[in-house]
Image: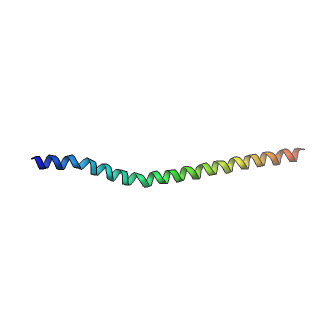
Amino acid sequence: MRAHIGKSARQPQRQAQTTIYLLTPLFALSQAQNARWERLQELAALRLQQSAKDSTQKQQ
């Protein structure tokens, strides 16, 4: 009986480690996606600024 209690007490820790192993690549992936998304937003902002400059130069 005692050995059985010890075994079941260790089980959740192993489960938690497995969850961490599975989530770590997902977290890294989401970080990469965030960086890519921020870069896209920067490029879009630069394009907007450039097109605004172009349109003001054409009007003059």
Of residues 50 and 1, the one drawn nearer to the viewer in this rendering: 1
Quarter containing the C terminus = top right
Q: Closest to the observer: 18 or 54?
A: 18
- Residue at 73%, 46% in the rendered image: 48
Farthest residue, direction left: 1
In this picture, residue 49 sits left or right of residue 25: right
- Residue 50 in the image: state x and y as whole percent: 77, 49
Q: Position of residue 14 (x, y in %)?
A: 27, 51
Give the number of callouts.
0
Q: Is residue 35 left or right of residue 42?
A: left
Q: Residue at x 15, y 46 (%)?
A: 5
Across and down, in percent, residue 21 comes to: 37, 54
Q: Nearer the viewer, residue 38 or 9?
A: 9
Q: Residue at x 57, y 51 (%)?
A: 35
* Residue 20 placement (x, y as % from top left): 37, 51
Residue 3 falls left or right of residue 59: left
Q: How was the colour assigned to the protein in this rendering?
A: rainbow
Q: What residue sits 64% from the left and 48% below the top? A: 41
